[in-house]
Every structure is written in structure tokens, then in C-alpha cells.
Amino acid sequence: MAFKRTQAMWEWTKDRFALQRIWQHVLDRRVAKGAWYFGDGATLFLLFCVLLATGAALTLGYTASPDKAYQSVRDISWKASFGWFVRGLHYWSAGLMVVMLCFHLFRQIMVGGYKSPREATWLIGVLLFFGVITMSLLGYVLRWDERGLYGLRVALNIFYRVPWIGESLVYFVQGGREITAVTLSRVYSAHVIFGPLMLIGLVGYHMYLVIVHSITSPTERKQPVRSGTEQRRVYQRDAQSEERGEVFFPETVAKSGLMAAVVLATALALTALYGTARLYPEANLHETSHPAEEWWWSWFSSLAAYLPPWLATPVYVGFPLLLFVCLILLPFVERTPYRGIRNRPFATLGVAACVIALLGLSSLRIASPWTAWPQPTPPPAPDGMQLPPIAEQGRLQFAAFGCNSCHAIDGHGPRVGPDLAKLRRTWSQAELRKFILQPPPDVAMPPYRERMTEQQLDEVVSFVLVVQTARQR
Amino acid sequence: MERRKALSLLVHGGSATAALVVGIPTLMYAVTPTSRQPSGPLWRDLGPLDSFPIGAYRAAKIQHSLASQAAQAVLSGVYVWRINEQTLVVFSRSCTDLGCPVTFDRRSECFLCPCHGGIFDKHGQRMAGPPDRPLYRYDVRVVDGILQVDLASVPPMV
């Protein structure tokens, strides 16, 4: 009797909440089988949900006002119970989302996931890509520490370079002449209201289109498919077939959920291991600071560092625009019938080149060999080298005149100028003197003509004369 | 069919009107800061002229005006180089590449940027890295012994 009533209630619920239709049209339908890496979409969806939940929770403790924001983030991180967990998980999920987003984008390019009839799915995806990338910068501005504020200022400087409307764009983002409380309000509103609202809408539509047009089926991945009509025929055959098709729930959900679970576990592990994201000194524009971007932007800094001045504006402004236009146009330009990784060697090569470039540039950022910076102590004498007194004096002058802000001695120090223990040829005393007093015009070194006494010059030159032989013994 | 067409037109027109009536003012509101750009100079104090010795580079902070204090403005740092009694140069600390904070290295007499390798000489001229222009210089004046800079003489994000 009780069982019957429960069943009746369940039937009622299914009918009144129209669950039967979701069951029929979404869950209990036959779909084509995907490969293991097709779980990246589900992973992004899960990370998105995690970010919505943790982000919504973070707003409960955050104060979007320059005099309180930093302290409120500190309180969230170290006073509220589980605050470190919520903020940490938000941070790590965001970073992993950027990584998975690139994975998803690259994977679709390799498979040809934008081909008919999935052009609209791709277009919404491109908007999502730029939306998430923007959110990944706005988010850390809200911490209102030096890293966040300088991150914002980098973005503002890029906007300023946009022809015609650059200055207006800066005013629009800043909300005025200076960075003020209004700026933080605007960033907060963009990250917490506009961004999530737009993303929720776009994610919903993206997933709706994935249900309608589905994923690239096994046969599509093997043989050329010329049109949307042909794709639908091929797809239906795959979905209905025993070995190339399956039921969406629970089979597909379980498979793609596995990748999502692994990535979420990674985010949880990183949160447990490193805790919440590091906070730098409170946002200010006047203290000596050595800010850096968040790790998922590292490649950009390396790219910027190697730009000749005349290329800076074209790359900062043109690169994002060009990327957007190329991605939007891709499904309309690349119309070959080949889908699936194996049939698309050029796509794979292109993606491989991008991945290598991204990883290579990112790893370059760790050493940042282009950064000159004042060093607190003089460089040590090269291993096993006894410096004569005058050269020892020169070693101290080497620091006193800031030579070691750019030059390393036998690997110790910045790498902006040449390492003076590893010069390609041996310099004479006269050459060194002349060079230090007045470097050639194309060399990025200040002249010491009016700054060094004859004795100081002698000391520095003796030091360099001695250490340049360090590698020649 | 005629009736249906007319109704459909009415629905489309009505929706579009509603969207515009709500949307346009909302959009105008959002872009207010771009149309209300202040014109003319915005003088801000840097400090007493006497606190900047001749020949030296001094780091200084632009002082709050009452308005900027109320707006909780984040104040920019500058470097003041007093060349002689009368001549002062005030450099922005914002690198002209992407706005990272340059530091004046007293020992090498260069401005060094911590981000992408921008290096400027003591006159603010580019020596290395991606910057495509010299360091920004503020217009300066001295009023009652107080050194002042004009915010409007540099780009808004500096």
C-alpha cells in the first residue's frame, strides 16, 4: 500500500514537473560513443558549477571597496571557517578551467568539431572562451593586492593602445580619470554579475546545441563527411549501432564524468596542498614592487618581453582581435570533409606548435632572463678564484655602480647583459675602459663617463679583466 | 493570415521598443565615464619643493585632493628629479609598455621595469625592452613652495 502510494507520488512528480520529457529527450537517448578525451566538456561544466558555488559563497564575505577589499579577502582566507577552502578551490578551479578550456579548444580543432552542422555550437564556444579568459583576469583584480592591481593596469595599458577609442576604453573600465572605488565596483560587477550571467546563458545554450547536434561520432572520425545532412545520417547510424553507440545516461555521463572527477580531485588536492592563493601587499601604485601575473598568463609575459617596440601595439591589440576573428571564421573557411584527429595532420601540427609555444614561453617566464633589477649584494668571485686586492675592490664597485643589476658573474646575477665571466673573447683593459665610460649607442648600458673616478674605473676594469679568464683556465 | 501578420509585426515592434527603451538608457549609463572626461588641468600636490634636493632622484606620492580622497583613489607614485633650482622633471612610475611599476636603480642610474624587461635611462629614454616611448612626464608647477603635478598631462591609467 505504502509502496503504491510512493509510486503514485513519483508518477505525479514526473508528470507535473515534466521530468519524463527530460528523461526522454536528454538522458534516455542513444548517442554515439566518444573517446576518453571527450570528457573535457563535462569537466568544464563541473568546474563552472564549482566556480559558481564557491564564487557565490565568497561574495558573502567580500567588500568591494578599496579601503576594505584587501582586509575582507584576508578575513575570508584566515578567519572564516573553511574560508581558505572556498577561496582556494575557487582559485585552483579557475586556473584549471583555463587549462581545460585550452584543452577543449585544441581538441575541437584537432577533431574538426566545428564542422557542419555544429558551426553554432562552435561560435557560442568561442564567445565562452573569451568570456572565461576575461573572467580569469577580473577575478584576481578583486583581491586588491599588488598583483591584482597591476594585472588590471596591464589590461588598461593594452586598452589605451587601441586606435581611436583607446582612451575612452580606459575611462570606461576605470570609471573615471583615476583608479578609484568606482573602478573596483566596475570590476566587481563585471566579475560577479555580468560575467556569470552571460556565461550561464552561453553555457546553457552551448549545451543545448551539444544535445541537438551532439558530438563527433566514431564514423565521422573515420570517414569524410561532406554536409550537415550526411553527418546526421551517419550519426544516427552510429547512435543506433551496438558497438558505436550507447545510452547517454548512465553510460556517457559516467565516462565523461570520470575526467571531470579527476580534474576536480586535482583542484581539491591543490587546495589542500597549497591552501588559498597567496596574497601580495595591499594594492598600491607607489611602493617598489615586483609584480607578476597569475601562472596561466605566464606565456603572455614572455611573449611581451621579446617584442621589439614597433611590434608591441600591433601584438597587444591585434593578437586578441585576430584570434577572435580567426576562431569565428574557422568553420566557414576550413570546409574540408575530414574529421577526427587521424585525418587532420595539419590541425594536429598547428595545435602541437601552439602547445609547445605556450609551454615554452611559460617556462621561460620562470627565469625571466630579460629582467634587470637592483641586487642587494655584490656577486661572489668565481669558484676557486683568488681576487687580487684591486680586483676585490672592483667587485664591490661592481655592485656600487649597479653593474650587477644587469650583469652576472659566472652565473650569479641577472642575465640581461652578458655574463662577464663568460665573454666570447678576452677584452683588453683599454677596450673595457672605453666601453664602460661610453658604451656604443646600440648597447642598453648607461655611460659612466661622468660618474666614475679614475681609480674606481681601474678597480672595476681589473675585476672584469680577472673574472673574464674564469672560464678560460 | 493578414491579422496574424499584423499581430506578429506588433509583437516584434513592441518587443524591440521595450528593449530599446530599457536598453539604451542602461547602456548610456554604463558608458557615462567615457563622455564625462574632465577637461583642463588637474593639479595635485607632491610635497614641499624643499623636500626635493637638487641633483637627486626622489620617489614621491601624488597627494589626495578632497575629491580623490572621497573616491578612494589609488594614488600613483612618481620619481622627482630636481635638475637645478628651477628645473624639475617628474616621471611616472608606470612603465610605458604595460604599466608595471618601474624602479629607479640609483647605482646604475636606470629605471628598471620588473615585468617585461623595459629599461630607461636617467632621462626616461627607452634603452631596452618592449616600451615604444619614453617614460611619461607630468607637467609641473610650484605654488606657495609646494610642488604640483597635472594629472591631465599623462594618460588616464598612468
Image: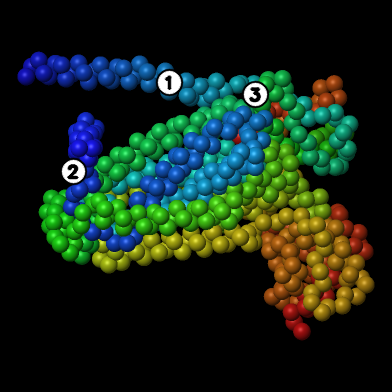
Mark 1 — residue? B26
> Which residue occupies the foreground of this view, B157 or A27?
A27
Q: Position of residue B87 (x, y in %)?
A: 82, 34
- Colour convention: rainbow
The amino acid at mark 2 is Gln
Q: Name the subunit of mark 3.
A: B
Name the kind of residue labelled 3 in the image.
Ala
Q: Position of residue B146 (x, y in %)?
A: 83, 25
Q: Secondary structure at mark 2?
A: helix
Residue name at image x 93 percent, y 72 percent: A389
Label 1 sits on what residue type?
Answer: Thr
Q: Are marks 3 and 2 on the same chain?
A: no
Q: Quadrant of the C terminus of chain A?
A: bottom right
Of pointers 3 and 1, the one earlier in the residue sequence: 1
Split into 4 quadrants, where in the image is the N terminus of chain A?
Answer: top left
Left/right placement of residue A51 relative to residue A7 reads right
- Element under label 1? helix
On what subunit does the disc labeled 2 rest? A
In this rendering, which labeled residue sits more in front, label 3 or label 2? 2
Q: Is residue A282 above or below residue B69?
A: below
Image position, residue A221 (x, y; %): 23, 62
Query: What is the C-alpha distance between the residues marked 3 and 2?
Result: 56 Å
Visible residue check, residue A452: yes
* B102, A137: nearer the viewer: A137
Q: Which residue is mark 2?
A: A24
Regarding mark 3 in the picture, which secondary structure is present there?
loop
Find disc 3 in the rendering and name its residue. B71
Q: CA distance from mark 3 to mark 1?
A: 23 Å
Quadrant in which residue B142 is drawn: top right
Local packing at callout 2 (Cα closer than 10 Å; few below 14, some 14-19, many 20+) is few
